[in-house]
Structures are given as C-alpha cells and as structure tokens.
Amino acid sequence: MDFTFTEEQTMMAAALRELATDLCTPAVLRQRFEGAEGGAEERWQRLAELGLFGVLAPLAAGGMGLTDADFVLLAEEAGRAALPEPFAEQAAVALPVLARCGADREVADLLPRLASGTARIAVAHPRNPLVNVPPSPTHWLLCSQGRLALATADGVQAVERSSVDAGRRIVEVSAAGEAGRALAQGTRADALGAEVLARGAIYAAAQCLGLTARMLDIASSYVRERNQFGRPVGSYQAVKHHLASVAVKLEFARPVVYAAATCAAGTDPGSLAAASHAKLAATDAAELAARTAIQVHGAMGYSWELDLHFYMKRAWALSGAWGDRSFHARRMQRLLLEGALPLGPDHTFAFSA
Amino acid sequence: MALDLAYTPAQQRFRSEVRDWLAAHVPQAPLATLESEAGFAQHREWERTLAMGNYGMITWPAEYGGRGANLIDWLIFEEEYYRARAPLRVNQNGIFLLGPTLMEFGTAAQKARYLPKMAAGEEIWAQAWSEPQAGSDLAALRATAVRDGDSYVLRGHKIWSSRAAFADWAFGIFRTDPASERHRGLTFMLVPLRHPGVRVRGIRQIHGEPGFAEIFFEDARVPLDHRLGDEGQGWHIAMATAGFERGLMLRSPARFQVAAQRLIDLWRSHGAEADPALLGRVAQGWMDAQAYALNTYRTASRLMAGGSIGVEASLNKIFWSELDLDLHRTAMSLLGARAELVSAGAPGPADDWLEGFLFSLAGPIYAGTNEIQRNVIAERLLELPRA
Ligand SMILES: Cc1cc2nc3c(=O)[nH]c(=O)nc-3n(C[C@H](O)[C@H](O)[C@H](O)COP(=O)(O)OP(=O)(O)OC[C@H]3O[C@@H](n4cnc5c(N)ncnc54)[C@H](O)[C@@H]3O)c2cc1C
C-alpha cells in the first residue's frame, strides 16, 4: 500500500508540462478558437518524440510497457494545458484495449505505429458520440453494442460538428455499428467496450483535474492583482472563500481519479464504481472551478479576450464526454443499491488493482 | 512501485488480528453516554481493555504503550474499530493531539510520565484553548501563568473545553509574560484539573448534556515541569497540536464510511416513499466518504515517505465536517416526519441520526471554524493577500 507517485512518474509529467509550455500556450489555443490549425502537427510530433503515445504499449510493440498509474499524471497535464489533441484517447484508451486483440494480424501491425504516433486513431463509443479526432487520422476504433471494430479513416462516415470548445476538432459518426472490420463480437466486444468507456471516463476525469488546477491558478493570480476599493479583490473574504472551496474540491477529487486509474482495466463492480466516481468528482470540481473563476474576474471573465474561457469550455465539453453526469450518477446509484459492491470501511479498495 | 493500492499480506494479517480481538472484546451493549459520570467511567474502563490488548495507540513506540505501527496500520485499525461499532475514544485529545505534541516537544521525563498513562486510559485529557473573548482569535487570550519561584501561578478563564467536566488533565496556552500581546509571550502548560485553585463547571450542550466545560484558574500553582517546551514557544507548539487535530487523526474516514453505509440502508428502508432526489444525495455521501478515505491513505503515504501536513489540514477539516453535515441532513430528510423523534432510527445510540445530526452541526465550528480554514487556504495555498 503506497499512495504516492515515484520520481519517474512525476518527471514524465513534468516533461509533458514543458512541452505544453512551449507548444500549447493560450496564444496557440486562441488560434484554434479562431479556426486555425494552431500547431497541431508539431505537438503530435513532439509527443511522439518523447515516446508518450507508447507509455502503455507493450515493450514488444515498441512501447514503454508501463501501467495506468504511470499515465494518469500525463492526462492531468494534458488537461492543465487544454491540449486539443486526443492524446489520452490514443495512448490510454484505444491502445491498451487494442493490445488485447493482438492476435489479429492487422492489430499486431498497428500497435507499434500507434505507440510511435505514426498511426492516429479516433475512438467512437455510444457514450461518447462526439469524437475528438487527431490531426490527419488514419484509423478508427468503433464500439457499438456487441461489436468492437477497427476501420481505416476513409471507411467511416463522420460529420464535423462545432463545439463551444473550439479547441478540439470533433465529429459525429453515423452507422458506427456497420463500419470497419469486427475484432470482437458479443459479450467479449461488450467487455472491451466497457473498458474503452471506463478508460475514456477516467482520463477525461484526469484532464478535468488539470483544468481545475489551471483555472484556480488563473483566478488566484487575477484577484491578487485586480484592485477595487483601494485593495486587491483577493483580499476580500467572499472572494477568498469561493476560491478556497474550489481548492477543497480539487484536493478530494485527485485521489479518486488516481485510484480509478489503477483499476482502469477492471470491469468488476468496484472498478466501475471507481470510474464513475472519478468522472463525477473531477467534473464537479472543474465545473465549480469554471463557475468560480468567471465570477471572480467580473466582466473581464465574460470576455473573449481573456484566456480563461478556453479552459472553462474544455471542462464543460469533457463533463459530457465518456458518459455524462446522468449516466455516471445513475450507474453509481445502481451499484450502491444492487449489493454487488462491497460497502464499509474495510472495503475502501474494493476494486481489482 | 508507487500508487500501489493493495494491502501487503502482513497488513491483511494485522486486519484479521484486530478484527478477531475486537469481536471478542467490544462490549455487547452500548456504553452510557460519555457526557455522564457513569458513562465516562465505562469509557475509561474500555480504554483499559484496549490497553490490555496493546491497542491503546498502536502508532506509538512500545516503551510508551504502543506497537510502533505505521500510519497504514493505524488506518486499518480504525477501519476495523468503526466496523465493530466500538465505543468512542474518551482519551482522543490525549492520544491523537497531546501525544504527538509531547513526542515532538516533550522532555524524556515528560514523555515517560504522561504517555503510558494516556495510552492506558488512566489519565484523560481535555483541551483548554478557548476563552470567552478568544475563540477564532485565539491570540487574544488572557489567561496567565506567572512564574513564582519553583512554580507557575495560573489565573484566567477557559471555556468550551470538551470532556473537561470529567477529565483529569488539560493542556492549553497561557501568557507567561503578562505584558505580552498576541502570539508572543505564550507558553504551553499541562494542568491537573482536580487541583487547588482549579474549578471546573460543566456547560450543557445543545442536546442537554455537559459535553464541554469552563475552567476557572484562581491562583492555581503547578510545578515548572508542567511546562511543555520553552517559555514563549506556546503559540508554535499549539499550532502543531492544532495541525494534528485538523490533519490526520481527529476524524477517521472509517467513521464516515460507516455513516454512509448506514445511510444507504436507511434509503433501502425509506426510499420507496422518498423524494427521488434524495438518492443522489445518498450516493454523494458515499462517494465523499470514499474520497475522504482515499485522500487519507494518500496523506498517510506522503507522511510515511517523509512529507509533512501543512495547509492540507485545513482542506481536510472543511471536507470531513461538511461531509458529516451532508450525511446527517440527508438522513434527517429521509426520516421525514419522524426525524424530530429522539431515536427515530433503528434502536441503539449508534443509530441515532438525530444525535449525529446535532453533533455534525458542531463540526464546522470546533477545531477552527470553516470560515477560518477557508481564510487559511486562500492565504497560504492560493497566496491571496491578507485583509
Ligand atoms: C462541540 C464543540 C467542542 C469544542 N471543544 C473545544 C475544546 O475542547 N477546547 C477548546 O479550547 N475549544 C473548544 N471549542 C471551541 C471552539 O474552538 C471555538 O468555538 C471556535 O474556535 C470558534 O470560536 P468562537 O466559538 O468564539 O466563535 P467566534 O470566533 O466568535 O466566531 C463566530 C462566527 O464568526 C466567524 N468568524 C470569526 N472570525 C472570523 C474571521 N476572521 N473571518 C471570518 N469569519 C470569522 C466564525 O467562523 C463564526 O462563524 C469547541 C466548540 C464546540 C462547538
């Protein structure tokens, strides 16, 4: 039992933070929001150079062969920067699930290319109807009831949609249940689809932690500088207490997401509860952060000119992605009442690690 | 490997050892309330039983009555303790707050004198910080301890001291320099409560029992070795004690996990007739208790790796106190028309939601109000300017 991260784990996250400080600045996000490409290709290349697409890929596929405990801080950093590209979807949702279908020739060939970032995959799931696509996608992973399929980019019909979060490029897939070639069917496909959903939810949650921290930083620096009535507005208690409440939410969402990452592959009741809990706790924190951050900025917070809205909009978008609040809240309620989830103080870690 | 969330075989063995011992020793019938003389005596007796099993305070070194256990073992012990519905710890101020403070600031003689009796439940401690004019603003305190030869002479009025009505000792801070102001000139003192010049008067709490007391010091003389640390060091030591209180030990996650589990049971029996929105609150209560447990393991791991608790203590204190309030407010809503009845839940004091509800209202007040904790978070963690 050890609930701390190693130095290697935090250093890998620091490397991503550095990358984002260079290549995913608010100025870059602004370009994306104005419709430009905003350096997407270069970011993808740099992520690939750092080997980050291969963190969870098996060594045999040229990956690092690490675990979700090693990945979760990376997703948090991606959130802090509001990284537009579906980095977590490729590296930590599609790749580990495809690795379970490694007996398939096409998949076996694809894994090293996903790990190196030369192949780029988008992931569709009924609980994630609006798909964030990578720049120049090559493949699709399609989950539908009783079917898990792999398709090439041109084999899928997708319609572009515009989101309040114009940082990402999203599409909606039609007829996902017929496209591509089935890798698994029936209950096996559903189990793999459940893992895709859990992973999507957990890494969306991890990104929400980073977004929350970022919004709290932006808001705290603003209220330290902005003066009204002759002193910084951050010295007023109403403002302090709003922001302190965000800090509390963030502190207690973190361990929930970290714990969920350790059972990202599990489909037992404890693991499902952990994933839903993570999604709910982190999106609640991010939504409170967004709501609070805009308030303490006054009218400035309502302006396009301020960078804050890039992060707020990502938080809103992720809150509906990979199972929205209603889905996860109802699943959690069901698990708590059905009796399959062991309850009580001796069952804090009632999930398959 | 880090972020390793599985118990070791040794930890699992320890859990079953604790479970077996508690199953054999926890009193069958609930004890009388701590807030009566008879109940206090029963709780003392239970502490002796715990000490005989060497479970008084397992994280302490063996020489002081502990087992040298680490914080993960302590959490396991607490989980089993609440799972077994064992009695409240009458000596919690001693073992959770003064104990760690003594280990850090006490002389060898003081540790040997006080710790074993604390772990054995032979001496029960109360905290005496607050004064009528010094609550949130503790540095406004006026009680004095003036040195006179080989003793200190104590004068002043402390109030809201939990358990002091029946306790043996109190610890608190006093002005050794009567001319001093605010945080300076304060000294940490250990004071016997049944002692000439010390008068204790119980104060009835909202439920009617004398759960706390006021303490009048009328030229009470105590020897110099009743001082902990140096003269003038009192504020610094008191803040360390308060950190222990808000930080890890005061409120075990297991306490709320049990309450959340009971709340789910309450939904099972009352849900059919209830406002469906209450189910969302029941589930939220379980999730928040779970989050608090996970975060406590995270804090324990960090401390074991050589880290410390700073402003996290304030984050913690807000979270558990608001969680406790939410759990009990939800239960009261589920109980509906019968919520006002004393013992409206299932029989037995452990299932008395009303009593728990009343006590949960105190959580955001004691151990430093939540308003003060939010100020601390804003100023120390978010680095916002002081007013
Ligand atoms: C059940 C219970 C047990 C207790 N046990 C003990 C004990 O064992 N030993 C002991 O010494 N004390 C004990 N206390 C007392 C407790 O520590 C104090 O109640 C607490 O510190 C608040 O002080 P106060 O009651 O004087 O409230 P006040 O300080 O008068 O506060 C009144 C209100 O004003 C707010 N307020 C005050 N200052 C500020 C500020 N700067 N910014 C924003 N809001 C502010 C407070 O948050 C509160 O809402 C206990 C209290 C309770 C309820």
Image (cartoon, grey):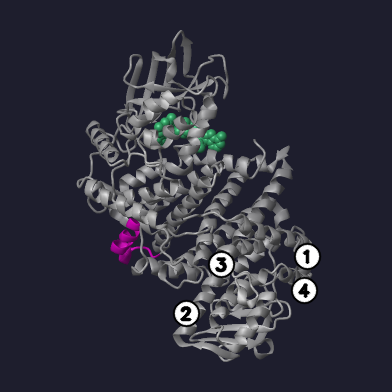
- Is the residue at mark 1 from the same chain as the one at mark 3? yes
Labels 1, 3: front one: 3
The residue singled out by tag 4 in the image is A41
Magenta part of the protein: which range? B261-276
Closer to the N terminus: mark 1 or mark 4?
A: 1
Q: Position of residue A39 (x, y in %)?
A: 79, 70
Instruction: Tell me how far mark 1 sits from mark 3, CA to CA.
Output: 31 Å
- Is the residue at mark 1 from the same chain as the one at mark 4? yes
* Label 1, residues with CA under 10 Å away: few <14, some 14-19, many ≥20: some
The secondary element bearing badge 1 is classed as helix
Closer to the N terminus: mark 2 or mark 1?
A: 1
Disc assigned to residue A191: 2
Instruction: Tell me how far mark 1 sits from mark 4, CA to CA.
Output: 12 Å
* Labelled pair 2, 4 in contact (Cβ < 8 Å): no
The residue singled out by tag 1 in the image is A28
Q: Is residue A196 above or below residue A147?
A: above
Disc 4 residue: CB within 8 Å of ligand 1: no
Labels 4, 3: front one: 3
Instruction: Tell me how far mark 2 sits from mark 3, CA to CA.
Output: 20 Å
The secondary element bearing badge 3 is classed as loop
Q: Is residue B317 above or below residue A184?
A: above
